[in-house]
Image (tube, rainbow, N blue to C red):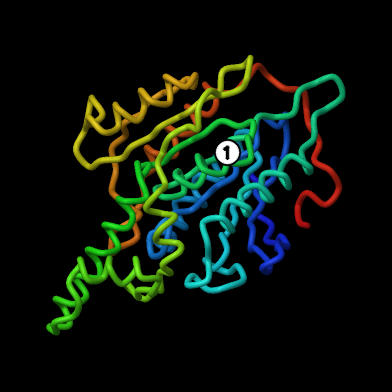
Amino acid sequence: MAQPPVAFFLQQPEGSRFCLHYPVSTGPVRGLCLYLHPLAEEMNKSRHMAALGARAFSEAGFAVLQIDLQGCGDSAGDFETASWRGWISDVQVASAWLREHYPAAAGDKQPPLWLWGLRAGCLLAAAAAAQHQLDCHFIFWQPTLSGQQVLNQWLRLKWAEQLQAAHAGPDLAQVRQQMAQGSPVEIAGYTLSAGLARDLERAQLMPSGGTGRAAPQPNVQWLEVSMAPKTEPGAATRAGVQAWRHCGYAVNVHLVQGPAFWQSSALETAPALVSASLAALLQGIEPAHAVVQPLSGARGV
């Protein structure tokens, strides 16, 4: 049985970051997983699925750390003051915490690090890995292929809000112009700063270039969910996968059946996503590691 998660705060110059650590209870530590959540309301609607995944991974020997990014969840700051650069720093600090608390055993390699993103969290994982040259693998849940898609989704919410309120607010072109001029925009209860909107618009789910690693080959486990059974990914996914493979990544695509839990109004789960992810992690890990004992204090700070 998995140990219960331990809550603690990581310190950053802009304030503390709330974290949940799911330690490995027994057996070898097969890998380290850092979960990067989606943005805004998608984060709240996905917490239960992130918890299900984290428990399953830790029971199978993967130590998991979940972090609430700057201005999100229970971390310090407001969403309005959050920045893409600050979030990338959060990823680097959280990755370092995992590596510090699960060092390599004598004569063995350190357990591999996996950046586990959901939706826009996948964009952040790719950006952080590129900027800090993290030696890591990736597990993508329903990845968003560009920050432009995130912005378009938020702008559609803004348009829907205005329709529901039955008043004539600025149209979407005017909202974009407002952000381009440096003004924040309130959408669905979240204030989106012009700086974050600008950085999001530039974000792409793309590797920065070659992996820079000799061996083993870095791994991407790409999982997509749909209610209708699918046998082939869409054209955009195929293009994205090809780009990662071209840069030297081993990419495996998994299509599973389940609800779009990150956007549903009711609480929904996709157990097939968790089971497929665990199977993918086990398939993608490097050869078996020796038992790695976490350092003193790994259950908390």
Number of marks in the image? 1
Q: Quadrant of residue 11?
A: bottom right
Residue 279: image location, x then y, percent:
48, 27
| Residue 184 or residue 188, whichever sits in front | 184
For residue 237, above or below residue 21 = above
Q: Residue at image x 17%, y 72%?
A: 171
- Does 114 sit left or right of 273 as displayed? right
- Does 101 sit left or right of 85 as displayed? right
For the question of whether residue 155 can be seen, the reply is: yes
For residue 163, above or below residue 135 = below
In which quadrant will I find the N terminus?
Answer: top right
Circle 1: is it few (<14), some (14-19), or many (20+) Cα within 10 Å? many
Q: Quadrant of residue 151?
A: bottom left
For residue 166, above or below residue 14 = below
Q: Residue at image x 61%, y 22%?
A: 212
| Residue 158 or residue 1, whichever sits in front | 158
For the question of whether residue 190 can be seen, the reply is: no
Q: Residue at image x 43%, y 69%?
A: 193
Q: Residue at image x 32%, y 51%?
A: 148
In which quadrant will I find the C terminus?
Answer: bottom right
Residue 127: image location, x then y, percent:
51, 43
- Kindly identify the amino acid type of the residue bearing the numbered disc 1: Ala
- In this view, the residue farthest toward the front is 181
Residue 257: image location, x then y, percent:
28, 37
- Does 231 sit left or right of 140 as displayed? left
| Residue on which disc 1 sits | 129
Residue 190: image location, x then y, percent:
40, 73
* Helix, strand or loop for disc 1: helix
